[in-house]
Amino acid sequence: MGIFIRRPLALASIALCVGVCLGSLLSLRRTLVWIGAVLLACLILFPIRRKSRSACTLLLLVLVFFLAGSARSLLAARSVERLTADRIGEEVEVELYVLEERYASAGSSSFYVRLHGVDGTRTNHRALLKCDYALPLYAGDRFRATVRMEAFDYEDVIGQNRGDGIAAVLISESSDSLVYVSHTDSPLSFFRTLQDRLSYRVRRAIGGEEGSLIAAILLGADEYLSDRTVRDFRRTGASHLLAISGLHVAILIGFTDRVLLWCRVGKRKRLSVDLLLCLFYFLLTGCSYSLLRTLIMLGFAALSFMLSAEGDGITSLLFGGAMILLVSPHALFDLSFQMTVLATLGILAFAPLGEGISRRFPPRKGFRGVLHYLLRKLFSSLLITYSASVALLVIQWCTFGTLVTTAPLTNILLIPLATPLLILSLLSLPFLLWPAAAGAVGLLPALLAKAVL
């Protein structure tokens, strides 16, 4: 708790997360009991601390954030209850908007959709559409259909992941009742189509598992990787390389920022370019929570610089996470959200230790300087990996039932390969789209991808 003593906004953000958790897991009556207990505790503590203005301000801030989180999750839960009440097991007329494909085969398919209407009533909930046939739907399609509404069972549908915020499961046994309303050219559908096309070009230019790995690391299209590769990455604790995260953005923005610095571009313009690049990459790779967290933190850093204020990574991380939960309370149960926040929090919490280790190996000239540089890099990589691994121990055990002890060693070996692989793939991407030059240009990224595999 020492890292939160002088961070009131971070403490308040944690209180909001607690409020969201209580409102999502407990019944309305129990949640109201907890809220009453918190209010009573605040009334007791407030007179004791009335002489300390900063303590009173902190207490009020924490209380407001806690109530906001509880109220937001309760409103979301009540809205879902009203949607599914008295309709479970019945056939309903729905109007759906396709968000993304979840599974597709020759005999069945399922999609994440947004309900825009149920029996003429306007709604705005997510649902899972399950079809007993192959259905060629794409992100952005809007259609009407007659489906059977079933209660959402988290364990039967998506394992233990409650983060999809699904209100109900919609079962469609025949395509005869499906009527297209429109195919929208929304920005999200445009970026999804662009991601699919770029992934196809990369995999065609660099064949085999190497091309699939480059498409996964660069564009987040990991559905083309073999089960064996995905299993090996998971067992060695390197699966974060396959999911687009803050690491990928840090590598790309670090490279772009260095190029702009060589071109003598000012810091304000570099920050603007970094924000636009992060936003484009966020839209291109599927709008994951990890990239949204990175985008918010980068925005806080840019705002601090513009206002000549001192930025704080832990505060921006937790406040950004709180803002995500206010918009989407079910994100608290999403594995991607949990891992990106906890891993980043672990890295930031142990950052002072890394600075102390770096001071023990100051820059020198000659052979000693090279040795100090290598030691700083080695200890920095070890500390970052260990701090993120420690922060994720509980999540890994509860979700996967195992702990990966080889993750630090694996990351020390793979990240130095993944960094040039990501940069070379990005630089080669325009040439990979040109079939005449794809073979020669893609040779080096293919060799690096093979080394990683």
Image (tube, rainbow, N blue to C red):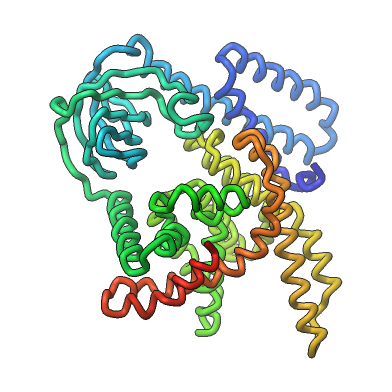
- How many numbered discs? 0
- Residue 358 place in picture, x, y as percent: 80, 70
Q: Would residue 35 be seen by someone viewing this image from the given angle?
A: yes
396 vs 430, left or right, is right
- Look at the picture and state if 414 lies above or below 427: above
Image vertical order of residue 124 relative to residue 431, above or below: above
Judge whether residue 280 can be spotted in this image.
no
Q: Nearer the viewer, residue 11 or 331?
A: 331
* Residue 226 rendering spot, x and y as whole percentages: 43, 51
Q: State the quadrant of the N terminus.
A: top right
Residue 120 versus residue 198 in the image, above or below: above
- Nearest the eye: 89 or 182: 89
Where's residue 179, x and y in %?
14, 31
Residue at image x 50%, y 30%? 159
Image coordinates of residue 288 in percent, x first then y, are: 46, 48
Q: Residue at x 64, y 40 (%)?
A: 396
Instruction: Give the quarter of the image for residue 375.
Output: bottom right
Indicate whether 259 appears above or below 92.
below
Q: Residue at x 76, y 45 (%)?
A: 4
